[in-house]
């Protein structure tokens, strides 16, 4: 496709950043755009696998403590989340149950709730409501030190970082630039990828085996760096 046609589809405003990052080379700008799409796809796949692994770890842990229908029960009157501080968590569960309606099963409810919901299991009020035990799903997590407390707040904040890049990709924002600049750079993507791999390992999950054949992020980042 000629660059003029490519730009007509993607818009001048969107492509200006790619042109600037590629010293106004139209061929490189189109290549960078495509590489960014590939990188976004790869990252989103890894994030999706991480999200599923995280929610399943949380669910298995809390089923063992609070029963096989713990999630719906937690939003019922007198349940774990039936309090002012957890009202949005309760509302999210009840909305998902209503959406599922006659198709409700516990497993479908787990799948219906998004990444943000599961991240909030490590927020202070939700963490306390479920028994302050969720850090056990991260058995390989480092011990806290005076410099760094690897507590539920730390995990909550790390998950927020992953949620941010997830939302960025979902809204078709590029991940191949320095944030807010027209400078080609893969450090943003690499840092988030490294964090995801680290959390997989803290959950004692063989991420290399899980992502076999799916993960080409470093290869694509290298291609972008040398473009």
Image (cartoon, rainbow, N blue to C red):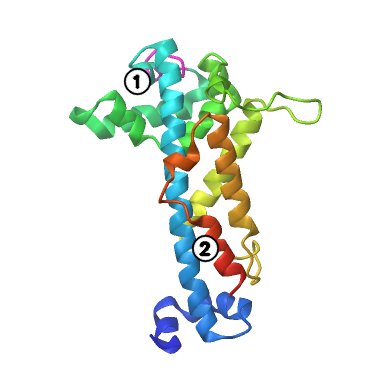
Question: Looking at the image, can residue 174 be seen?
Answer: no
Residue 61: x and y in percent read 45, 19
* Residue tagged 2: 220
Residue at the image point whose x is 56% and y is 42% from the top: 197
Residue at the image point whose x is 60% and y is 43% from the top: 195
Name the quadrant of the N terminus.
Answer: bottom left
* Residue tagged 1: 72
* Magenta-tinted stretch: 74-82
Q: 104 or 184, which is in the foreground?
A: 184
Residue 72: x and y in percent read 34, 20
Q: Is residue 127 above or below residue 223?
A: above
Say if mark 1 contacts mark 2, CB within 8 Å: no
Residue at the image point whose x is 66% and y is 68% from the top: 181
Q: Is residue 214 above or below residue 31?
A: above
Q: Is residue 88 above or below residue 33?
A: above
Magenta run includes residue 205: no
Magenta run includes residue 80: yes
- Residue projecting furthest to the right: 146
- Residue projecting furthest to the left: 102
Residue 5: x and y in percent read 39, 86
Residue at the image point whose x is 52% and y is 16% from the top: 129
Question: Looking at the image, can residue 135 be seen?
Answer: yes
- Camera-near label (1 vs 2) is 2
Q: 76 or 52, which is in the foreground?
A: 52
Report crowding for label 2: few under 14, some 14 to 19, many 20 or more residues within 10 A (C-alpha).
some
Name the quadrant of the C terminus.
Answer: bottom right
């Amino acid at each position: 496709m000629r660059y003029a046609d490519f730009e007509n589809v993607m818009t001048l405003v969107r492509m200006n950043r790619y042109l600037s990052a590629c010293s106004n080379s139209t061929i490189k700008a189109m290549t960078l755009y495509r590489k960014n799409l590939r990188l976004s796809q790869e990252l989103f796949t890894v994030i999706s696998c991480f999200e599923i692994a995280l929610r399943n770890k949380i669910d298995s842990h809390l089923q063992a403590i609070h029963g096989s229908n713990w999630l719906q029960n937690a939003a019922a009157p007198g349940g774990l989340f039936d309090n002012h501080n957890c009202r949005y968590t309760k509302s999210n569960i009840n909305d998902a149950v209503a959406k599922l309606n006659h198709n409700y099963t516990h497993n479908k409810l787990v799948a219906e709730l998004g990444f943000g919901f599961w991240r909030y299991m490590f927020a202070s009020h939700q963490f306390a409501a479920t028994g302050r035990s969720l850090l056990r799903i991260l058995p390989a997590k480092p011990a806290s030190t005076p410099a760094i407390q690897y507590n539920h707040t730390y995990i909550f904040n790390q998950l927020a970082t992953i949620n941010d890049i997830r939302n960025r990709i979902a809204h078709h924002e590029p991940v191949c630039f320095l944030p807010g600049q027209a400078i080609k750079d893969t450090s943003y993507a690499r840092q988030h990828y490294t964090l995801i791999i680290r959390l997989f390992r803290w959950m004692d999950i063989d991420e290399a085996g899980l992502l076999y054949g799916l993960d080409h992020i470093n290869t694509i980042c290298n291609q972008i760096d040398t473009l």
